[in-house]
Image: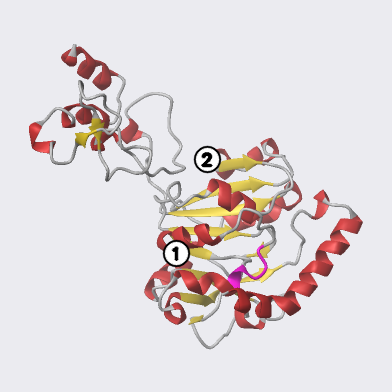
Amino acid sequence: MRFLLQEVLEEIHLPTSISTSFDIAGKEENINQISESPFSNGSSPRIYVSTNPRGAELLPPGIVVSESDFFLRRLWGEPSEDLKKKPKYLLTITVGLNQKKNIDRMVKKFSEDFQIMLFHYDGQTSQWDEFEWSKSAIHVSIRRQTKWWYAKRFLHPDVVAAYEYIFIWDEDLGVEHFNGDKYMELVKKHGLDISQPGLEPNNGLTWQMTKRRGDQEVHNFVEIMAPVFSREAWRCVWHMIQNDLVHGWGLDFALRRCVEPAHEKIGVVDSQWIIHQVIPSLGSQVSRVQLVKLLTVRKACGLATAVNVVAWI
């Protein structure tokens, strides 16, 4: 029976960790990793590995996979041959169909090292198939939500652990002066765990702190428009994001809690810059009255956020 099971596992191309895990439970040399389960009735000892992730203590260690990714898989064949090249970075953008031409321009600034993931707040996904890159992108469609809602629910640190850096960007960004690969070179050169491109100082609504400075490569502070997180920093930031967070105003002041020393690990990359086009996200999804209220709240947050967040910190 044991050999028959092994043959079946090999035939359906299951990962080797699954097949080998059946041996782990029975080998005496692994007995120090496995103790009798507290749920055992005493007559038949069961596996219990306290060092396994919570909820997986009853599994052999070799079968436990605690992290995942967004790599697309074929329906047949050898899993090791599914990907010609594994993306190193994850670019997520919260989008509406009205901005698809701009999104196309944005995506083309990133190489095959970037996995593309679109969060659709208007429920329209099939219309994006006119772009070849869209066919290999990850599409998540839930109406009338903001990027932080999506990030909290779909970008759990264990799900995005395969990516070195995670981009969480708005849809209204001009990228004429931006290149994804060159940006990553500078991020790594300066050891930035939380970063963003510089913002063109003469276009759009921007914080003074994030405006591009032409005389240097990098300066400090990052806001929520186009942040980029290392996977280590994102694990902390994800836990800080509250479930009812909507627009995220003020979150930028708290990012420093997730890296040390913050003045070295957080920075704006000035030599790779973008333009904020100031197109309200979800603009077509709300009424004029609701939009006026939203902009009023945003203005109030701009005046009060620094005081409130510093008090909270």
Q: Name the residue beneath numbered marker 1.
A: 233
In which quadrant is the N terminus drawn?
A: top left
263 sits to left or right of 130? left
Amino acid carrying label 2: it is Ser
Q: Nearer the viewer, residue 111 or 249?
A: 249
- 43 up-or-down from 15: above or below: above
Secondary structure state at the residue bearing disc 1: helix
Type of colouring = secondary structure
Q: Is residue 204 visible?
A: no
Location of residue 288 by image quarter:
bottom right
Q: Nearer the viewer, residue 83 or 9?
A: 9
Q: Residue at x 46, y 69 (%)?
A: 258
Query: Magenta region: which residues?
Result: 248-252
Q: CA distance from mark 2 to mark 1?
A: 27 Å
User: Is-magenta flag for residue 250?
Assistant: yes
Q: Residue at x 50, y 76 (%)?
A: 267
User: Is-magenta flag for residue 234?
Assistant: no
Measured from the top left, where is residue 145 in percent x and y? 70, 49
Q: Is residue 92 visible?
A: yes
Name the disc covering residue 91, or none: none
Nearer to us of marks 2 and 1 is: 1
Amino acid carrying label 1: it is Ala
- 175 up-or-down from 11: above or below: below
Name the disc covering residue 136, or none: 2
Measured from the top left, where is residue 130 in percent x and y? 65, 40
Which residue is situated farthest in the front direction here? Answer: 42
Secondary structure state at the residue bearing disc 2: helix
Sort mark 2 into few (<14), some (14-19) or many (20+) by Cα contacts within 10 Å: some
